[in-house]
Image (cartoon, rainbow, N blue to C red):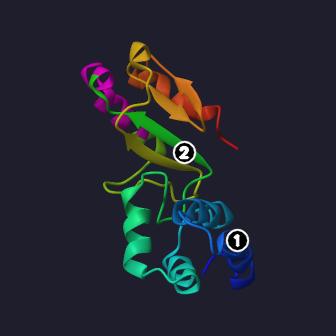
Amino acid sequence: MSGTNAQLDAVIAKYRGKHGILIPLLQEVQALEGYLSRPSMRYVGEQIGVSSAEIFGVATFYSMFHLEPQGKHVIKVCKGTACHVSKANAIADALREALKLESGEITTSDMSFTLMEVACLGCCSLAPVIMIDGQTFGKLTPEAIPGILERFAY
């Protein structure tokens, strides 16, 4: 378990006895750990009387939750209609190549970057667009990707 039982107990205590606590409780556990580990989800469920299946169902339904550790920088690639027709796939491919991600991998081996595809970033006029740590980059070409990533290198 990434978070200690004492740390998790402190978070759980804030919500015990309240209604509609599961999502904000899991958000705080994720903030503590950086993701939702299975042992922590199981522990939280035991402490608040919610089945592991329900906890897992909520954690996998909402895209804000992560079941694996995330990189220091999170890159979101828009795959919405405007971005798709503006060659978002080429941008995603350029990111995978620059980050040296193998098929199926989303986080670099050094935990620097996590690459996520999202349905829409709400920046259609900037298509194709990516967001890194909340910073938006639009009207991209594959050739622009290495320069953008350099801004986030250590």
Identity of the residue drawn at 30% across and 20% down? 82
In the rendered structure, find residue 74 and report the number of the disc placed on it. Answer: 2
Identity of the residue drawn at 49% across and 52% down? 64
Up/down of 11 relative to 94, above or below = below
Which residue reaches farthest top? 125
Query: Measured from the top left, where is residue 138 in percent x and y?
Result: 47, 19
Up/down of 58 relative to 41, above or below = above
Q: Quadrant of the N terminus?
A: bottom right
Up/down of 79 relative to 22, above or below = above
Query: Measured from the top left, where is residue 46 in percent x and y?
Result: 53, 86
The magenta span reads 82-95
Q: In the displayed structure, does residue 99 sit left or right of residue 13?
A: left
In the rendered structure, find residue 76 and report the number of the disc placed on it. Answer: none
Query: Measured from the top left, where is residue 27 in percent x and y?
Result: 59, 59
Identity of the residue drawn at 40% across and 25% down? 142
First of labels 1, 2 by sequence position:
1
Q: Is residue 85 magenta?
A: yes
Up/down of 46 relative to 67, above or below = below
Q: Classify 10 Å Cα crowding around label 1: few (below 14), some (14-19), many (20 and above).
A: some
Front in this rendered view, residue 135 or 30: 30
Residue 126 position by quadrant: top left
Identity of the residue drawn at 50% across and 82% down? 42
Residue 133 position by quadrant: top right
Q: Classify 10 Å Cα crowding around label 2: few (below 14), some (14-19), many (20 and above).
A: some
> What is the distance, in whole Å, between disc 1 and disc 2 at their CAs?
25 Å
Foreground: disc 1 or disc 2? 1
Element under disc 2: strand
Q: Quadrant of the C terminus?
A: top right
Q: Which residue is mark 1?
A: 11
Q: Is residue 120 magenta?
A: no
